[in-house]
Image (cartoon, helix red, strand yellow):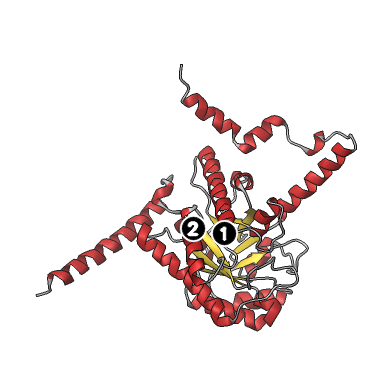
Amino acid sequence: VPSHAIINAIIMSFFTAWLFQLLALACLATHVHSLACPAPERLKRLLQDEMDGTRDSELPIMLPCCYDGLTARLVARAGFEATFMTGFGVSGANGYPDTQLISFKEMRDACCFVAEGLSSAAMEMKREPIPCIADGDTGYGNAINVKRTVFGYATSGMAGIMVEDQVAPKRCGHVSGKSVVPFDEAVQRVKAACDARYEYESQFGPGTGPLILARTDALKTDGFEAGIKRCLAFREVGADMTFLEAPESIEQMKDYCKQVSGPKLANMLEYGSTPILPPAELKRMGYTMAAYPLTLLSASIKAMQESLDRIKNGLPTDDLILEFSETKDAVGFTSYAEEENRYKVD
């Protein structure tokens, strides 16, 4: 006769399985409350739909990159399925180059603003917030720091986190001077992130742990095969997605997609090292996601520089700007007024 301990273990295993099934059903339900389907679970399902062909689109998952609450709102209101918080953008918006001058706390604060921007846009559109993958740089220290970073981003509302293998202080993957940590250290860094994902779920429930996007910059420093080796090792220790940074040819992009399993990210940095290809071609090649890391930041810099030049020379800017009503709506005044009226005291 089984002991009480064995019986209790069996009951708990059935109960856990039931909870997972209940979560899956909740996520499939229409207009489900966001707490019933955490952001990481929504991202996971989006990736699964793309990987198994049930997502109805000729394009990969398009990720225009945001870097603050406003850009997050704009991406969501434009109808995209997901977004990515770019470290380059967060650094640039604060007046710094992407050389890890921005700290973990500052990046986590940016995550909070992005999450709030996505949430406010979702409330206006009466839908769930779109999931966001956030740039976690090198994890801001050793493997233990990486785990804290994963927890910090998770509690800030991020659906995923990118962890890379550069030596700290890291820098943009398309500029000179970067270097990577040794192979074993890189793998342990990613493993720590994956362990933190599971540990977070053990505390807060199934589907709450942020997905791990493992990035390698080894292609530039150690060669293509070294980069592939790292991507394969990252998958073996549990990375949900991989990102081979800065391939320099279409052939390298194709070989990466052929050799590495799972969801893969293409980084479409205009005027960078990687060929800029049409999204449909990226999908046919085997990419799951296409990120546009600097398009919004670069476009805004160009617009602001032109506006400043006109102001300096006493010229009108009417054709460069939105009407005031449009600006107010973009930043949330319309929904604020509705809420204010809702709680108005006569």
Side of 193 where 291 appears, left or right: right
Work out whether 264 lies above or below 56.
Answer: below
Q: Quadrant of the N terminus?
A: bottom left
Instruction: Work out whether 23 lies above or below 169.
Output: above
Is 294 or 31 nearer to us in this picture? 294
- Quarter residue 310 falls in: top right
Q: Quadrant of residue 103?
A: bottom right
Rendered position, 282 above or below 156: below
> Which residue appears at 89% of the width and 34% of the height?
314
Residue where numbered disc 1 is placed? 104
Disc number placed over residue 218 in the picture, else none: none
Residue 219 x, y percent position in the rendering? 67, 77
Q: Dot 2: within a 10 Å radius of its alpha carbon, few (fewer than 14), some, or many (20 or more) residues?
A: some
Tell me the quarter of the picture where residue 15 sits: bottom left
Q: Secondary structure at mark 1?
A: helix
Amino acid type for the residue under numbered disc 2 = Gly
Helix, strand or loop at label 2? It is helix
For residue 156, above or below residue 285: above
Can residue 118 be seen by looking at this rendering?
A: yes
From the viewer's side, name the closer residue of 55 and 320: 320
Please report the residue visible at 52 percent of the width from the left and 60 percent of the height from the top. 160
Does residue 223 appear in this view?
no
Query: Residue 30: percent from the left, percent from the top?
Result: 42, 47
**Marked residue nearer the N-terminal end (1 or 2):** 1
Label of residue 152 in the image: 2
Residue 21: image location, x then y, percent? 33, 59
